[in-house]
Amino acid sequence: MKRIVISTAIAAMFAVTAAPAMAGGFWVHQSGYGNSTGGNQNGWNNRYSVQQTGKWNSQVGQQWGKNNVGAVGQEGRRNSADTWQRGNNNAAGVGQFGNNHRTMITQDGNGNIVAGVQVGNNCSADVTQVGSGNVTAFVQACP
Protein backbone atom coordinates (compact mmCIF):
# COMPACT_ATOMS: atom_id res chain seq x y z
CA MET A 1 0.00 0.00 0.00
CA LYS A 2 2.78 2.41 0.94
CA ARG A 3 4.46 1.69 -2.41
CA ILE A 4 1.28 2.52 -4.30
CA VAL A 5 0.89 5.85 -2.47
CA ILE A 6 4.51 6.78 -3.15
CA SER A 7 4.25 5.76 -6.82
CA THR A 8 1.03 7.71 -7.23
CA ALA A 9 2.54 10.80 -5.61
CA ILE A 10 5.59 10.65 -7.83
CA ALA A 11 3.49 10.12 -10.96
CA ALA A 12 1.27 13.06 -9.99
CA MET A 13 4.36 15.17 -9.39
CA PHE A 14 5.68 14.44 -12.87
CA ALA A 15 2.28 15.15 -14.42
CA VAL A 16 1.99 18.48 -12.63
CA THR A 17 5.53 19.55 -13.50
CA ALA A 18 5.23 18.49 -17.13
CA ALA A 19 2.01 20.40 -17.85
CA PRO A 20 3.34 23.95 -17.48
CA ALA A 21 6.24 23.32 -19.85
CA MET A 22 3.80 22.40 -22.62
CA ALA A 23 1.15 25.01 -21.85
CA GLY A 24 1.16 28.83 -21.77
CA GLY A 25 2.37 30.91 -18.80
CA PHE A 26 6.08 31.13 -18.03
CA TRP A 27 9.00 28.78 -17.53
CA VAL A 28 12.20 29.64 -15.66
CA HIS A 29 15.41 27.65 -15.35
CA GLN A 30 18.17 28.80 -13.01
CA SER A 31 21.47 27.17 -12.10
CA GLY A 32 24.35 28.36 -10.03
CA TYR A 33 24.65 30.55 -6.97
CA GLY A 34 22.06 32.87 -5.43
CA ASN A 35 19.01 31.66 -7.38
CA SER A 36 15.67 33.31 -6.76
CA THR A 37 12.41 33.82 -8.63
CA GLY A 38 9.22 35.70 -7.91
CA GLY A 39 5.90 35.79 -9.56
CA ASN A 40 2.31 36.89 -9.73
CA GLN A 41 -0.24 36.15 -12.37
CA ASN A 42 -3.76 37.39 -12.13
CA GLY A 43 -6.39 35.93 -14.43
CA TRP A 44 -7.37 33.25 -16.95
CA ASN A 45 -5.19 30.42 -18.11
CA ASN A 46 -2.31 30.76 -15.60
CA ARG A 47 0.57 28.31 -15.62
CA TYR A 48 4.20 28.37 -14.49
CA SER A 49 7.18 26.14 -14.11
CA VAL A 50 10.42 26.88 -12.27
CA GLN A 51 13.48 24.69 -12.16
CA GLN A 52 16.39 25.64 -9.95
CA THR A 53 19.67 23.81 -9.61
CA GLY A 54 22.41 25.19 -7.46
CA LYS A 55 23.12 26.87 -4.17
CA TRP A 56 20.64 29.28 -2.57
CA ASN A 57 17.43 28.31 -4.36
CA SER A 58 14.21 30.09 -3.54
CA GLN A 59 10.92 30.66 -5.32
CA VAL A 60 7.57 32.34 -4.79
CA GLY A 61 4.73 32.08 -7.36
CA GLN A 62 1.17 33.33 -6.98
CA GLN A 63 -1.78 32.98 -9.25
CA TRP A 64 -5.25 34.28 -8.55
CA GLY A 65 -7.90 33.18 -11.07
CA LYS A 66 -8.95 30.47 -13.58
CA ASN A 67 -6.96 27.41 -14.72
CA ASN A 68 -3.92 27.69 -12.39
CA VAL A 69 -1.07 25.19 -12.36
CA GLY A 70 2.21 25.80 -10.56
CA ALA A 71 5.26 23.57 -10.55
CA VAL A 72 8.65 23.93 -8.90
CA GLY A 73 11.66 21.65 -9.10
CA GLN A 74 14.67 22.37 -6.92
CA GLU A 75 17.89 20.45 -6.62
CA GLY A 76 20.67 21.18 -4.19
CA ARG A 77 21.40 23.38 -1.17
CA ARG A 78 19.06 25.67 0.70
CA ASN A 79 15.86 25.16 -1.35
CA SER A 80 12.55 26.77 -0.47
CA ALA A 81 9.36 27.20 -2.48
CA ASP A 82 6.05 28.91 -2.00
CA THR A 83 3.10 28.75 -4.25
CA TRP A 84 -0.29 30.23 -3.50
CA GLN A 85 -3.18 29.97 -5.85
CA ARG A 86 -6.58 31.37 -5.09
CA GLY A 87 -9.40 30.28 -7.41
CA ASN A 88 -10.59 27.82 -10.04
CA ASN A 89 -8.87 24.70 -11.30
CA ASN A 90 -5.68 24.82 -9.16
CA ALA A 91 -2.94 22.14 -9.05
CA ALA A 92 0.50 22.61 -7.59
CA GLY A 93 3.59 20.46 -7.48
CA VAL A 94 6.94 20.78 -5.77
CA GLY A 95 9.90 18.45 -6.10
CA GLN A 96 12.90 19.16 -3.90
CA PHE A 97 15.97 16.98 -3.87
CA GLY A 98 18.88 17.52 -1.51
CA ASN A 99 19.64 19.82 1.44
CA ASN A 100 17.49 22.15 3.50
CA HIS A 101 14.10 22.01 1.69
CA ARG A 102 10.99 23.90 2.79
CA THR A 103 7.68 24.16 0.95
CA MET A 104 4.49 26.03 1.58
CA ILE A 105 1.57 25.60 -0.78
CA THR A 106 -1.75 27.30 -0.12
CA GLN A 107 -4.70 26.95 -2.44
CA ASP A 108 -8.02 28.55 -1.65
CA GLY A 109 -10.86 27.24 -3.80
CA ASN A 110 -12.13 24.96 -6.57
CA GLY A 111 -10.20 22.12 -8.31
CA ASN A 112 -7.24 21.85 -5.86
CA ILE A 113 -4.61 19.10 -6.00
CA VAL A 114 -1.12 19.14 -4.52
CA ALA A 115 1.70 16.73 -5.19
CA GLY A 116 5.12 17.01 -3.64
CA VAL A 117 8.32 15.12 -3.11
CA GLN A 118 11.15 16.02 -0.75
CA VAL A 119 14.18 13.77 -0.59
CA GLY A 120 17.42 14.06 1.38
CA ASN A 121 18.11 16.29 4.38
CA ASN A 122 15.90 18.62 6.39
CA CYS A 123 12.53 18.69 4.54
CA SER A 124 9.40 20.43 5.84
CA ALA A 125 6.10 21.25 4.13
CA ASP A 126 2.88 23.10 4.81
CA VAL A 127 -0.06 22.38 2.57
CA THR A 128 -3.32 24.23 3.10
CA GLN A 129 -6.25 23.72 0.78
CA VAL A 130 -9.59 25.19 1.73
CA GLY A 131 -12.60 24.74 -0.59
CA SER A 132 -13.68 22.21 -3.23
CA GLY A 133 -11.86 19.14 -4.64
CA ASN A 134 -8.78 19.02 -2.33
CA VAL A 135 -6.35 16.14 -2.80
CA THR A 136 -2.84 16.03 -1.39
CA ALA A 137 -0.03 13.58 -2.04
CA PHE A 138 3.28 14.43 -0.40
CA VAL A 139 6.24 12.12 -0.03
CA GLN A 140 9.16 12.89 2.27
CA ALA A 141 12.39 11.08 2.93
CA CYS A 142 14.28 13.29 5.36
CA PRO A 143 17.31 11.62 6.91
Image: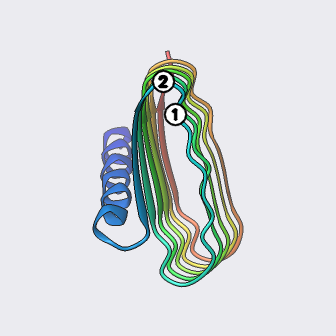
Q: Nearer the viewer, residue 135 or 96?
A: 96
What is the x, y in percent for residue 13?
37, 51
- Image quadrant holding the N terminus, namely top left
Give the CA distance from mark 2 to mark 1: 6 Å
Mark carried by residue 33: 2
- Side of 20 relative to 103 (left or right): left
What is the x, y in percent for residue 137?
48, 51
Q: Nearer the viewer, residue 43 or 89?
A: 43
Q: Are marks 2 and 1 in contact (CB under 8 Å)?
A: yes
Which image quadrant for residue 80?
Answer: top right
Q: Nearer the viewer, residue 3 or 70?
A: 70
Mark carried by residue 35: 1
What is the x, y in percent for residue 140?
48, 32
SS assignment at label 1? loop
Question: In the picture shown, does residue 133 fall above or below 60?
Answer: below
Q: Which amino acid lies under the numbered mark 2 shown in the image of this protein?
A: Tyr
Q: Residues within 10 Å of mark 1 (few under 14, many from 20)?
A: some
What is the x, y in percent for residue 106?
67, 58
- Side of 97 relative to 39 (left or right): left
Question: In the picture shown, does residue 4 fall above or below 128?
Answer: above
- Number of marks drawn: 2
Task: Point out the residue furthest to the top here.
Answer: 143
Q: Which amino acid lies under the numbered mark 1 shown in the image of this protein?
A: Asn
SS assignment at label 2? loop
